[in-house]
Amino acid sequence: MAVPFSGYGTAVGLVSIMIAVSGILLGLGIASGDRKLKELGREELYQSVMNGVIVGSLFAALVPGGIIATLISSLTPAGMQCSGVLSQNYAICFANNFLVGLTPVNVSGSSYPTLMDSALSLLLPVSGIYGAVSFIASLRVDVVVASFSFSTVLQPVVSLLSYIISALSFTIASLEIQSMLLYFVAATSLPVLLPIGLVLRTFYFTRRLGGAILAVTLALFVVLPLTYVMDAQLVASYSQNAGVIGNVSLAASSIKQNVTQSLLGKSASAGVFSGISDALSSFVTYVEGELDAVMKVVALIIVEAFFLPLFSIIVTVVSARELARILGSEISFGKFDIF
């Protein structure tokens, strides 16, 4: 049977050694009648046995086909493929693809674009619209001694489009950060943090620290990716139309082209005033028909990229705290302790 994590042999060896040492201490305490030595030996023997139970439980849970591996596979939608460290945990693989994957993900039998694809598919056409509207807003009409600028009329719309672009840019950065966090969890949980936690929990002076590291490791490796699976299920439950982003992107690109062509074409053939009038008319039509849909999609992406991950962090922190108590340790997360 494959070893589920590196350091397993070391952990088993240390547990065996500590059981022997604690047994010796207990025997010396009983033989000498030293109550403190006997209590120390009894406590160390109990903790060593508990360490053995923890090591055995982790082996049974994390080995392929074990409890945790089976649970993760059963709760995570099928169809995801990852390479390298991301393949160690199917839930992490799904979460990473859900965030920044190149292909749509399958949730509840339906295909949904990844969050990165959704953000980028809006950012590009909205940036094009922003450029077209900014160009119109920069125009000035000079007639003899009078002049008129459209920036006063269009500046609120330009500001709104700028806000949308900023929000989408921050969303893309957030998705990349979350993807790197998942990669870090996959790369360090089993190979690094878990063995360190097991080793530190073996010794008396570092037992609480080791328990805390074990609790954080299990929360990051199991709970955190599963919360992303739950987030994807929530998104699928309230997402009315998986193709709405694509429809908005096509409409936005078409509007940008129509506004620009109307402005330039009419200006050349029918005069500046007619060209600008037609361009503004096209833009007003866009505002009335499509801007509301764009804002709804942007708001939905922000919820998926910021608020649902915040919920995942809270659940992970609470899980780590409760696991630490089970392992005989304590973890304080400051203001998160109110949960």
Image (cartoon, helix red, strand yellow):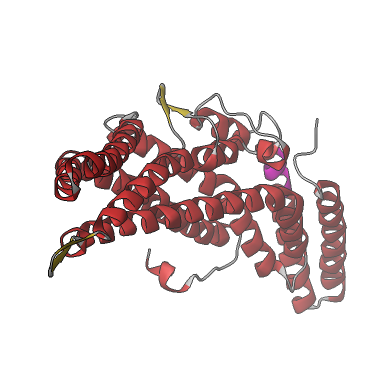
Residue 31, quarter of picture:
bottom right
Taken as a whole, is the magenta stretch helix, strand or loop?
helix
Residue 276 percent location from the top left of the image: 18, 49
- Tell me, yes or no, if residue 64 can be seen here: yes
- Percent across and percent down for residue 250 are 33, 32
Q: Is residue 235 magenta?
A: no
Q: Position of residue 190 (x, y in %)?
A: 71, 48
Question: Would residue 158 be found to the left or right of residue 271 on screen?
Answer: right
Farthest residue in the front direction?
144
Q: Quadrant of residue 72?
A: top right
The answer to whether residue 112 is above or below residue 21 is above
Position in image of residue 217 (x %, y %): 63, 55
Left or right, residue 66 beside residue 223? right
Magenta-highlighted residues: 55-59
Residue 311 visible here: no
- Of 2 and 117, the residue lying toward us: 117
Towards the viewer: 211 or 32: 211
Quadrant of the drawing holding the N terminus: top right
Residue at (73% x, 39% y) in the render: 84
Q: Can you say which quadrant of the picture contains the C terminus?
A: bottom left
Foreground: 135 or 96?
A: 135
* In the depicted structure, whether residue 24 falls above or below residue 67: below
The one nearer the camera, 170 or 110, is 170
User: Is 195 located above or below residue 226 in the figure?
Assistant: below
Q: Residue at x 32, y 59 (%)?
A: 163
The answer to whether 50 appears left or right of 314 in the picture is right
Queried whether the magenta region covers residue 57, the answer comes back as yes
Report the number of discs.
0
